[in-house]
Image: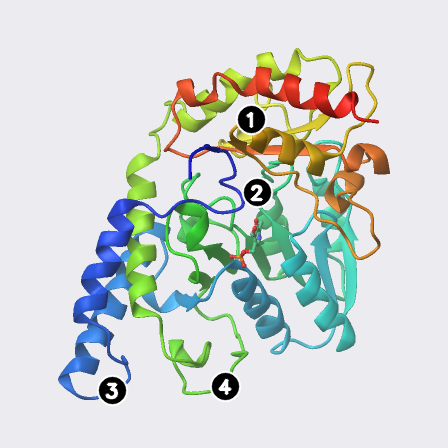
Amino acid sequence: MSGVYLDASATTPPAAEVIAAMAAVQAQAWANPSSLHGFGLAAAEALERARWQCASHLGCRPQELVFTSGGTESIHLALVGAAACLPVGRLLISAVEHPATEAAALQLQARGWQIQRLPVNREGLLDQAQLAQALEPPTRLVSLIWGQSEVGSLQDLQALGGLCRRAGVPLHVDAVQVVGHCAVDFNSLPVELLSLAGHKLQGPRGIGALLVREGLALQGVFGAGGQEGGRRGGTEAVVLAAGLARALELAQAQQCGPGERDPLAKLRDGLLDPLLSLPGVQLTGPDPRRAAARRLPHHLSLLVGTEGGQPLSGRALVRELWREGFAVSSGSACHSSGSAASAVLMALGFSEAQAASGLRLSLGPWLTPADLAGVPAALARARQRLASTP
Ligand SMILES: Cc1ncc(COP(=O)(O)O)c(C=O)c1O
């Protein structure tokens, strides 16, 4: 299929090196790692090699890394597993969490936990003073999205995590959009739990990890056979773990050093002026020209209206842009209420109509400036067609 893929925040194409690494492990280490014969031992060895490699790229100890099936499962294990070891209390989350966190929070609510959602500002950023205040008892657990998938905001994790540490409240961070794009050194982060997913960084689908700080009590969510230190039962996905390890290695090699500009941020920033000069188009989330450190480097999100400023449907724009050869996302799923408005954009203070006009472009290393050159004109044509449709 041809087209320019600008939807990295949804998923990414697996890197050729990842596919090759998985093929090699699939051929040699296909057995059950719990089996005591030589085939099983080879699989167990491949699994532990992958765990060591992942841990070294993420700055954690191998025993702190639990392989899961992806971001949703990691988040569920973090919240439900940690809460099971705590007295019932209050869980703090932000108003712009991924649905996976909302779903886990609702499970805790059914078990008697209070849920408090911290508001964000117009850029999707949390207020430290509000978090500090909310950390009073009975708050016993906090879960925050580090890099917001729809509007790209990157929370100041050092500051927010420092507040949680000082209050003695464990913090889980949803780093699904961050890992692969920003350096992550678990050892030096003020967090107890961190979730990630392989498919956001050109790794395989179906694998993720939860990092669990040594000493933090966590009850496994599937009992089963005691795999992953009793924290995640079920026969381990050795091949996918090897793919995740290779993807993390590639991502680390691509990350820029201190003082260097992220190549994807450079590509993204080249699109800003041409897109924002279209009347009726505005940026959502932090403006990277003013606050680059507060925005995911590969992420650009917009509200798109007619030249007169009338909001257009983000979902219709996605279809029109695909006709132009660009794969993007609207960032708003159709909710059961029937409204296409994004809850995240509404939490940032946009109206329901504006919150249904979101468009997200998220980039990856497979793109060149030439791939992106036609985006502004394609968007202008796409919205022209929509604006003239009765
Ligand atoms: C911020 C964030 N958290 C969690 C998830 C869920 O991850 P997965 O799709 O791997 O379950 C996603 C996926 O889009 C995400 O963007």
Q: What's under tag 3, amino acid-wise? A: Ser
| Cα distance in 3D space between marks 3 and 4 | 19 Å
Instruction: Please state the horizontal and vertical placement of residue 279, each as a whole percent of the image.
Output: 73, 12
Q: Secondary structure at mark 2?
A: loop
Q: Residues within 10 Å of mark 1 (few under 14, many from 20)?
A: some
- The residue wearing badge 4 is 223
Q: What's under tag 2, amino acid-wise? A: Gly
- The residue wearing badge 1 is 324
Residue at horizontal 57%, vertical 33%? 322
Q: Is residue 215 above or below residue 196?
A: below
- Left or right: 388, with 204 as reference point: right
- The residue wearing badge 2 is 147
Instruction: Please state the horizontal and vertical placement of residue 226, each as a whole percent of the image.
Output: 41, 85
| Cα distance in 3D space between marks 1 and 3 | 52 Å
Q: Which image quarter: residue 62?
A: bottom left
Single out the mark in the foreground, 3 or 2: 3
Label 2 near ligand 1 (CB < 8 Å): yes
Residue at horizontal 30%, vertical 69%? 238
Q: Are circles 3 and 2 on residues that touch, CB within 8 Å?
A: no
Specify the label residue 35 is tagged with: 3
